[in-house]
Image: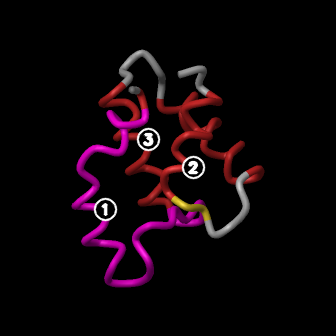
């Protein structure tokens, strides 16, 4: 399933995020978090450009209520990409 590819091994993200806040939530306002998610999606689905992924993330930032739980947020982004 597509979401498992993207949600696989977020340990680097979790370790960095735990220093500041709850790692199970995605922060649209943090550039490093957006870049991390772009990288995870590009690795799983290289057919998408960084710009396409970023636009899908921005759309979900507006439609998924904050705080953004990781799994539903990633599902939203993948849905916007048609995955």
Q: Nearer the viewer, mark 1 or mark 3?
A: 1
Q: CA distance from mark 3 to mark 2?
A: 16 Å
Task: Please identify, in this view, whether the residue under mark 2 or under mark 1 is nearer the observer.
Answer: 2
Residue 17 image position (x, y, % from top left) = 36, 73
Q: CA distance from mark 2 to mark 1?
A: 17 Å
User: Which dot marks residue 72?
Assistant: 2
Colour mapping: secondary structure
Quadrant of residue 64 in the image?
Answer: bottom right
Residue identifier under label 3: 38
Q: Position of residue 48 (x, y in %)?
A: 47, 21
Q: Residue furthest top?
A: 47
Dot 1 or dot 3: first in sequence order is: 1
Name the residue tied to disc 1: 13
**Residue 27 sits above or below residue 50 on the image:** below
Dot 2 or dot 1, earlier in sequence: 1
Does the stretch in magenta take in 41? no
Query: Along the line of sight, which residue is nearer the eye, 72 or 80?
Result: 72
Within 10 Å of disc 2 (Cα), the crowding (few <14, some 14-19, many 20+) is some
Nearer mark to the viewer, of 3 and 2: 2
Residue shown at 51%/62% (left/top)?
26
The span picked out in magenta is 3-30
Q: Secondary structure at mark 3?
A: helix
The residue at the far front in this view is 1
- Residue at 63 percent of width and 69 percent of height: 67
- Residue 17 highlighted magenta (yes or no): yes
Residue 5, given in percent of the width and then of the height, sits at 32, 33
- Residue toward you, 54 or 44: 44
Q: Is residue 12 left or right of residue 51?
A: left
Separation of residues labelled 1 and 3 (CA atoms) = 13 Å
Instruction: Find numbered disc 2 in the image and state the secondary structure of the residue it sits on.
Output: helix
Q: Is residue 81 above or below residue 35?
A: above
Q: Earlier in the sequence, mark 3 or mark 2?
A: 3
């Amino acid at each position: 399933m597509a979401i498992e590819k993207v949600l696989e091994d977020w340990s680097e993200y979790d370790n960095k995020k735990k220093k500041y806040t709850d790692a199970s939530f995605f922060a649209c306002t943090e550039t490093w978090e957006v870049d991390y998610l772009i990288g995870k999606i590009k690795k799983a689905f290289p057919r998408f450009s960084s710009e396409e992924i970023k636009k899908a993330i921005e759309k979900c930032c507006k439609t998924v209520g904050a705080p953004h739980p990781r799994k539903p947020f990633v599902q939203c982004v993948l849905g916007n990409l048609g995955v």
